[in-house]
Image (spheres, helix red, strand yellow):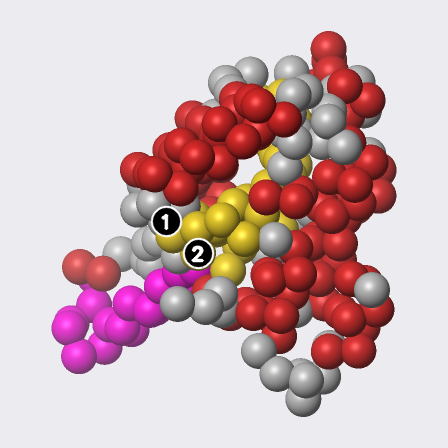
Amino acid sequence: MLLDATDSQLVLVDYQDRLMPAIFEGPQVLANAVRLARMAQMLRVPTFGTEQNPEKLGPNPAELRELCQKTLSKMSFSAASDGLVDWLRPPVKQGGGNARSLPKHLQKPAAAPAAERQTVVVAGCEAHVCLLQTALELIEQEFDVWVVTDACGSRTERNRDAAFDRLAGAGAELVTTEMVAFEWLRSADHPAFRDVQALIK
């Protein structure tokens, strides 16, 4: 099974200013998150950010925030518990008007719901806390979850790697930034191929 850009959403968890200096390989982790967000923008993949207790940990970097359609401020370690699922799976809007006031043959048919994107590509910090809990809850919500390992970090390698082991065991797909790029593109004929390739070179 390959990633499909038309079925994907991207979630970037807690790359906050006061947290990132403590993250193992933090500059590379953040650089890959920005690459993911830029690729998502080029390929029209909806992108959401989260910030854990931003009053204490600060915001995500401006460069990353600008690439997200919305950023969720949260106190729960899992963003899914604080409203992320509603962004990823918006409720179906009911049609307006009083249907009982018109005969059936004059009523407008209900609008078909927008196509739902079932795949969530997720990356973030700390891998063994907020990223892990968010991803596990998204799996429970029956999303297909793909974790971008080289855009995830913890303060220690051991904690990061333990998170990956647990996520793989729970059914998440573990991928890298380049794997996401080339699976979203699928072909060197894609109109965005050169721009995406330039980002990852």
Q: Which range is magenta?
A: 101-117
Amino acid beneath label 2: Thr
Q: Name the residue beneath numbered marker 1.
A: 143
Q: Picture coordinates of residue 97 (x, y %)?
A: 32, 57
Task: Give the labeled residue for mark 2.
Answer: 119
Q: Is residue 101 left or right of residue 9?
A: left
Image height of 76 relative to 62, above or below:
above
Q: Which mark is residue 169?
A: none
Name which quarter of the figure residue 99 lies in: bottom left
Q: Quadrant of the C terminus?
A: bottom right
Q: Are marks 1 and 2 in contact (CB under 8 Å)?
A: yes
Q: Is residue 149 above or below residue 103?
A: above
**Magenta stretch mostly in which secondary structure?**
loop
Q: Amino acid at mark 1?
A: Phe
Q: Residue at x 40, y 32 (%)?
A: 166
Callout 2 crowding tier (Cα within 10 Å): few <14, some 14–19, many ≥20? many
Q: Secondary structure at mark 1?
A: loop
Residue shown at 71% from the left, 62% from the top = 39
Q: Residues within 10 Å of mark 1 (few under 14, many from 20)?
A: many
